[in-house]
Amino acid sequence: MKKFALKTVLLVFLLSFLSCDNSSNDLLDAINDEKGETQEEENTNDDETNNSTAKTVVDAYGQLSVSGSKIVDKNNNAIQLRGMSLFWSQWMPQYYTKGTVSWLKKDWNATIVRAAMAVEDNDGYLSNPEREKAKIFTVIDAAIEEGIYVIVDWHSHHAEDHLEDAKKFFAEVAQKYGNEPNIIYEIYNEPLEGASWNNVLKPYHEAVIKEIRKYDSDNIIVCGTRSWSQKVDEVIGNAIDDKNVAYTLHYYAASHKQYLRDAAKNAINNNLAIFVTEYGTTEYTGDGYVDSEETKTWWKFLDDNKISWCNWSVADKNEKSAALTPGASGDGNWSLNQVTESGKLVRSEMKDKNPTF
């Protein structure tokens, strides 16, 4: 403000020696322009100050919510999160650790992590609920400590068959963590082709949401869509009546291309918020090849539309979509030699584009 005041005095002084009206008007315009530029500089500095004082992404963004087709921060600014999904909890338990979450934040610059709790498949939650819950809670606690967001994922293809279990689990999570702004609920990972949105999926989501909202009124809930969470456009005209709901879109870059982006854009144009809670750089099998060009095309689409994402997956499985090579530690501290082609591609994207704190 001192800089502006000095310039103003000098300009007014010069104006007093000029008799031409046009010159006077020009100088007055210059004064107003200078004032506007100075105010813009002050606003920019304020924004930079706010960002610089934040210690973590959750500190910066705070309580997330849905506004139209966008996920927004505490100041109603559209935001985009980028991070990693863990693998099925019962098959890659070694990465459900504080060390993994800490390293993803520190070295990969992740702003979100997804805890994919297996449900019915081979020794998942239905067989060992306390053991699997403990893994999820470990990841949630680590994410809160690191100040990043965390998706609690009911990783099932048949969730409608286990509605009561889902309600019980998410009610417990909401009671335990509902006051934390870090939490995002994903209540059905990937419904199959035959699960009708109107008759099966929407009623399921509404029942689980009702349980969550008993204890958590505002954290975002992400709802799976038909056909492995690709039919987001089927929600148009029959959305869930909850102000903080987004809809799941999953894709694998080598298999799912422009037609799926078109469907997603149709949903966005109809005011539906989308969250890509899982995607791969490979074929839909999780294997095949890494399609780097189509991956970058997808990233541009997600950036253009402010869509948040988690990459599949933090795993050392011998397949192309795995981010780590076999034997990589469960405590993080991975060298680049322990990061796969897909992992390096995704890590670079996060380090280039995510905010740092």
Image (cartoon, rainbow, N blue to C red):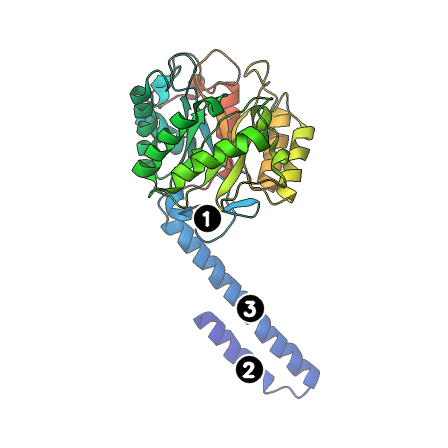
Determine which of the numbered discs, if any, sits on residue 12 in the image.
Answer: 2
For the residue marked with disc 1, what is the amino acid? Asp
Please give the label number shown on residue 36: 3
Going by the numbered disc 3, the residue's amino acid type is Gly
Q: From this viewpoint, is residue 305 visible?
A: yes
Point 35% across, 39% down: residue: 147
- Is residue 75 depicted above or below 259 in this figure? below
Looking at the rendered image, the quarter that the N terminus falls into is bottom left
Residue at the (58%, 42%) spot, across then down: 272
Q: Position of residue 213 (x, y in %)?
A: 40, 42
Residue 173 placement, left or right of 281: left
Q: Which residue is mark 1?
A: 73
Alpha carbons under labels 3 and 1: distance apart = 27 Å
SS of the residue under disc 1: loop
The answer to whether residue 143 is left or right of residue 263 is left
Tell which of 308 and 230 is nearer to you: 230
Compared with residue 269, is residue 103 higher up or lower down, i.e. above or below? above
User: Within 10 angstroms of label 3, few (less than 14), some, or many (20 or more) residues?
Assistant: few
Residue 53, position as x, y percentages in the image: 36, 51
On the image, the x and y values in percent for residue 335 come to 40, 21
